[in-house]
Amino acid sequence: MQARSVLGRSTATWPSFARVMGRASWQTWWPRSIARRLDGVGRTWIMLSLAAVLPLLFSGGWVASYYAQQARANIRHMASDTVERVAQRLADELSGQLQVAEALAASTALDNGNLEAFRQAAARVLAFRPRWQSIELTTPSGAEVLRMPSAEIATLGPIADRPLVTLRVPVLRAGTLRYVLSFSMAPDSVATILKTAGAPTDWIGVVVDASGHIIARILGGGLQFGKRAGDTLRAAMARAPAGTYAGRSLEGVRVETVYRALPSTMGWTVAFAIPLRLLEAPVRRALYILAGVGGAGLALAALLAALVAHDLAQRRRDERALATRALAASEQRRALALDAANLGTWRWEIAPDRFDGSPRCRDLLGLAPDALRQSAETWQHATTYVHPHDCPVLQTAIRRCCHGLALECEFRVVDAAGQVRWVRMDGRLQEGGFDGPRSLQGVIADISALRRAQAERLALQRRLAQAQEEERRRISRELHDQVGQTVTGLSLGLKAMEESLAERPSHPAMRARLHWLRSLTAEIGREIHRTASDLRPAALDDFGLHRAVETLAARWSERYCVNVDVQTVGPIGRMSPEVETTVFRIIQEALNNVLKHARAHNVSVVLKQADEQLRVIVEDDGVGFYPDQVGQSGASPPLGLSGIRERLNLVGGTMGIESAPGSGTTLFVQVPAQPAAPGPLA
């Protein structure tokens, strides 16, 4: 429909504008010289103006579009009503004329071929039908039988000075076509109906016959007859009996046409064409209104935005001055805090590879003071005095920090005088701005005293562990040598008394009580032996770690009815007493954890010694747990795991846990097979 095409043209500028604005930022269409001069206040002014005007424009555009659509819909509805009304009136008019012609065709004069009587009847009809110009009777083959009056009459087109319209009705007798009755009439009545239809004078009304010739046409209040209808109308008539199409009139005016075929008229069609300028008029009016409202809104928004921008500019100047003073005070406090904490600051620009540090940082890294520096320093030059054994650790930490992780690294620095100090470097990755480079920056601190305190604490814990083991060994020996021998002597004495009473059958109760005391003494002896073994298993000192673990597993499995399987991968040689004792206590604590928490049925212990490392795996088929949730919500970690970690710290070992609910738990332990006693700063 043409209405849709008109709407598309009237609104096509908005999507195209939106597409252009979507592809380019405001700097591309705004002059660069002005864009460079626009500071924050100018941009604020523009954004406030747009924020005030755009909602008004959008709402106004929606209202205008709705109004235009309603106006065009009303025009189309009016055209459809006019076509319906004209079609009904034409159908009624032609129906009356055809009824008269059918009555004449039913005349009895034609039954017996009395043409004179039929002529008289036709003359009477012509007398009472002033619009009828002639009546003609022909055979089915087209041969003329009768014509009244006898002048030459064309079916459509000018006859002398006026056009005529011819209608035909069949003359049937006994179901056989005898004649064809035709009557010609002036199209004045059809034109009158078009003219009095109530359509606006700018509309074009037309009635067309089946062959595409114009029967009646009205344009600007005047009538036109006899022309051939346009190709667009004839194509629409052939396509559908009613509808709407867009095209051009015979005068070349762009129009939207509503047409409908008339029933019982041998293909007549009535149509009204509406010039598109009438349909576009509501759109133009809506755009004018929108432009006016938008201009007024823009002026008001510009005034309000100017006032708000001025206020914002003043506030920004005040805030900038306040921020400058606050920044200066913050820098002073920062420098004071760094001096109080004895920290150094550093910054490394990655892409240019330029390193810069405070005097304290340069002193901690063993670098020359700023006054003696010859040129800009690189990262490699800044880390010249890092201990060779700690360089891989620092490089790994730097790579992780370049990927967004925090830098937390402790390493040793050996200065030119050979003095060793421990330092801690902390930093963060700073992404470059619009033109700034990516950089790492942070602080550095001397932790030599902390490291010495940690070494002393570790040595104290090691001595304490050794003292505990020595005390365990002493208590175990005392239980075995003294208390155990005393209990054994008591058991032998009770046995002798029981044997002496056996010779006196008169005291059965006394014999039974002595038997019970002897059994109790034997049980006490076994408990003393088990306790002494738990305190310090003799197999650990005599046969080594492997045999001690097997003995522990056998006794633990027998006591708690849990199957324990001990396996070794390769030979397990003797290690230092400290390592063997630590690993044995770790396995003992792991079995206690299985008993307390796992509810397992089977436990597997694997020992493997390779690459000067002793690896221990303790696995159970218990209920399992989430290792990541251990110690969360402020709760302290389980004492068993804490004890294992503390023991591993004494020998430089590591620990890992794999577990999940319903999947059991696996403990991985790795310790050096022959650990060296570390010095305070080694």
Image (cartoon, helix red, strand yellow):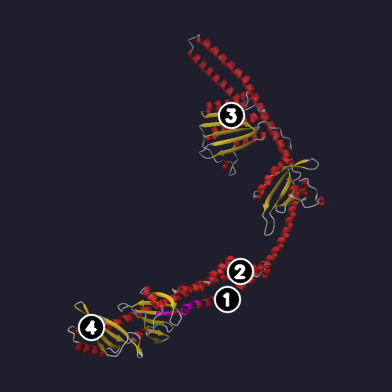
Label 4 environment density (alpha carbons within 10 Å; few <14, some 14–19, many ≥20):
many
Q: Which mark is residue 105?
A: 4
Q: Which mark is residue 568?
A: 3
The mark that comes first in sequence, 4 or 1, is 4
- Residue 498: x and y, percent? 53, 13
- Label 1 sits on a secondary structure element that is helix
Q: Is residue 538 above or below residue 390?
A: above
Q: Is residue 143 above or below residue 21?
A: below
The overriding secondary structure of the stretch rendered in magenta is: helix
Q: CA distance from mark 1 to mark 2?
A: 15 Å
Residue 26 part of the magenta segment: no
* Residue type, numbered disc 1: Gly
Q: Which mark is residue 48?
A: 2
Mark 1 sits on what residue? 295
In the depicted view, which residue is nearer to us: 327 or 254? 254
* Residue type, numbered disc 3: Thr
Q: CA distance from mark 4 to mark 1?
A: 74 Å
The mark that comes first in sequence, 4 or 3, is 4
- Residue at 39% x, 75% y: name it: 235
- Residue 682: x and y, percent? 73, 37
Question: From which residue to which does the magenta span run?
Answer: 272-283
- Residue at 26% x, 89% y: name it: 148
In the depicted view, which residue is nearer to us: 224 or 159? 159
